[in-house]
Image: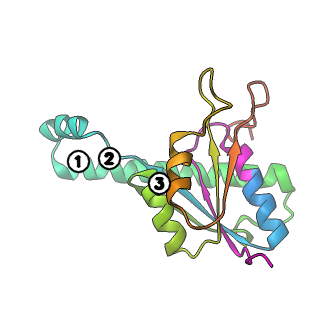
Amino acid sequence: MFPEISKILYATDLTPNSAYVFRYAMDTAKKHDARIVILHVIEPLSPMSEMLIASHLPKDKRDAILRERIHYAMEQIRQRLKNFIQKEVGGEFEPDTRVEKIDVCQGFAVEEILKKSGEYGCDLIVMGTHGKGVIKNTFLGSTARRLLRRVRKPVYIVPLPEEGEEVVFNSI
């Protein structure tokens, strides 16, 4: 017997095709009567960039910019989610019935996905992977590959659609 799936962590990078991956998370949640936690991770700046910015901006200004980026990402996710649900399910249910939480944090994507999936008690992780370059069908994206090396729970890695098949949040 398979373990029960009651909570899904949907990790998004907010790229235009992230709606495509969200459909998989939503479909899985419906089939298992599960809840979804949406996670977006803002990667930290490189040490060199951090030093350059620190030399020009005081810490309170840097912290304010980070808070603004987090607020902007949260609003983008909420608006896209609302548009997605209206288009996909035609008001069949309110967004809050499947989406339990939207979390935007700063850190390294793999570390935060692992930490938050445990913190929220998620049984499954759903994320997309980008195919890049000539060998796009051979290798997973670096974040997906690093996550798979360390995770101890099921992960759905959804390849993003080919060009011409774009399913974008912005157009929803």
Whether 111 is drawn above or below 137: the answer is below
Residue 28: percent from the left, percent from the top?
Answer: 78, 62
Cβ atoms under marks 1 and 2 closer than 8 Å:
yes
**Disc ID at residue 65:** 2
Residue 46: percent from the left, percent from the top?
Answer: 28, 39
Mark 1, residue position: 61
Circle 3: residue type: Val
Q: Residue at x 75, y 41 (%)?
A: 172
| 154 falls in the magenta region | no
Circle 2: residue type: Ile
Whether 112 is drawn above or below 33: the answer is above
Mark 2 neighbour density, 10 Å: few (under 14) some (14–19) many (20 or more): few
Element assignment for label 1: helix
Q: Nearer the viewer, mark 3 or mark 2?
A: 3
Which corner quadrant of the image does residue 32 belong to?
A: bottom right
Residue 53: percent from the left, percent from the top?
Answer: 20, 37
Camera-side residue of 88 and 51: 51
**Disc ID at residue 122:** none
Mark 3, residue position: 110
| 18 falls in the magenta region | yes
Element assignment for label 2: helix
Along the polypeptide, which appears first: circle 3 or circle 1?
Answer: 1
Q: Say whether residue 165 is visible.
A: yes
Element assignment for label 3: helix
Q: Residues in magenta?
A: 1-22
Question: Is 14 left or right of 50, judged from the image as shown?
Answer: right
Circle 1: residue type: Lys
Q: Nearer the viewer, mark 3 or mark 1?
A: 3
